[in-house]
Amino acid sequence: MGWTIGYMRGSTDKESQKFDRQQVQLEALGCNHIYADRISGAKRDRPELNRMLSDLQAGDTVYIVEISRLSRSTKDLLEIVEAIKTAGASLKSINDSWLDTSTENPMSDFLLTVMGALGQMERQMIQQRIKEGVKVAQEKGVKFGRPTANRNKVVYALELYHSGRHTTREIADITGVSKATLYRKLKEQA
C-alpha cells in the first residue's frame, strides 16, 4: 500500500481562497503529503509537480481536487497522467469522480482527453477575451503600464539632487518622484 499524495495549484496569489479550499479538501482526504504550486496550469515547468512526479513510487495515489488544477493543456495533462501511471501510481480527482486511473478504463481515458481539451479551450478563450478587452481599452485611450512622471516634478527632483542638500529618499518624499525615476533621469543626463 502506497502513500496518499495531494497536488494543488493556484495560478496567482489572488486565487488564495481557491488554494486554501484545495488544501482543506486534500487534508480531509488524509493525504500524507501535499505538493503545491502557485503557477499557471499552462506552464509545464512547475517545481512541485516535477518533484512529486520524481518522488512517486508504485502503489502511491495522487489526489487532485479537479482536473483543471493539474493542467490546462491537453498534451501536458496526458503526459502527466502517463508519468504517474509509469511510476506505478494512480490518479484520482475529488470533484471529477470519473477520474480514477487505478483500473484500466477506456471511458475514463476518453473523458480525461475530452476534459483536458475543454480546459485548454477555456484557457484559450480567456486569453482571447483579455486581448480583445485590452485592444478595446487602448482604442478608447486607456493607457497601460506605469504613469509617466510629471515633468515639472522630475525637473524639481533633479534640482534638489544637484543641490546636494537632500538624500534620494528625501527627494522622493518631497517631490513624489520615485527613486527609480530619479536614478533613471540622472543616468540619462550622464
Image (spheres, grey):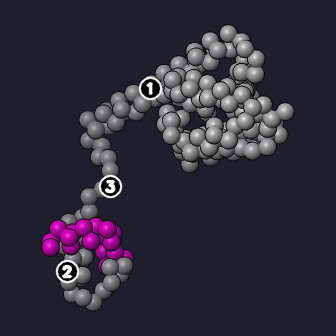
Q: What residue is shown with label 1?
A: 124
Residue in view at x 32 percent, y 50 percent: 145
Residue in view at x 24 percent, y 81 percent: 161
Q: Nearer the viewer, residue 40 or 81?
A: 81
Q: Is residue 51 left or right of residue 170?
A: right
**Foreground tag (1 vs 2):** 1
Q: Residue furthest left?
A: 189
Q: For numbered disc 1, what is the local secondary structure?
A: helix
Label 1: how many Cα within 10 Å (few below 14, some 14–19, many 20+): some
Residue 42: percent from left, percent from top: 49, 33
**Foreground tag (1 vs 3):** 1
Residue in view at x 67 percent, y 10 percent: 106
Q: Nearer the viewer, residue 60 or 107?
A: 60
Label 3: how many Cα within 10 Å (few below 14, some 14–19, many 20+): few
Q: For numbered disc 3, what is the local secondary structure?
A: loop
Query: Which mark, residue 56?
Result: none
Q: What residue is shown with label 3?
A: 146
Label 2: how many Cα within 10 Å (few below 14, some 14–19, many 20+): few
Q: What residue is shown with label 2?
A: 159
Report if the CB atoms under discs 3 and 2 are less than 8 Å apart: no
Q: For numbered disc 2, what is the local secondary structure?
A: helix
Quarter of the image that includes the N terminus: top right
Residue 178: percent from left, percent from top: 33, 69
Q: Which residues are magenta?
A: 171-190
Residue 165 sits above or below residue 127 on the image:
below
Quarter of the image that includes the C terminus: bottom left
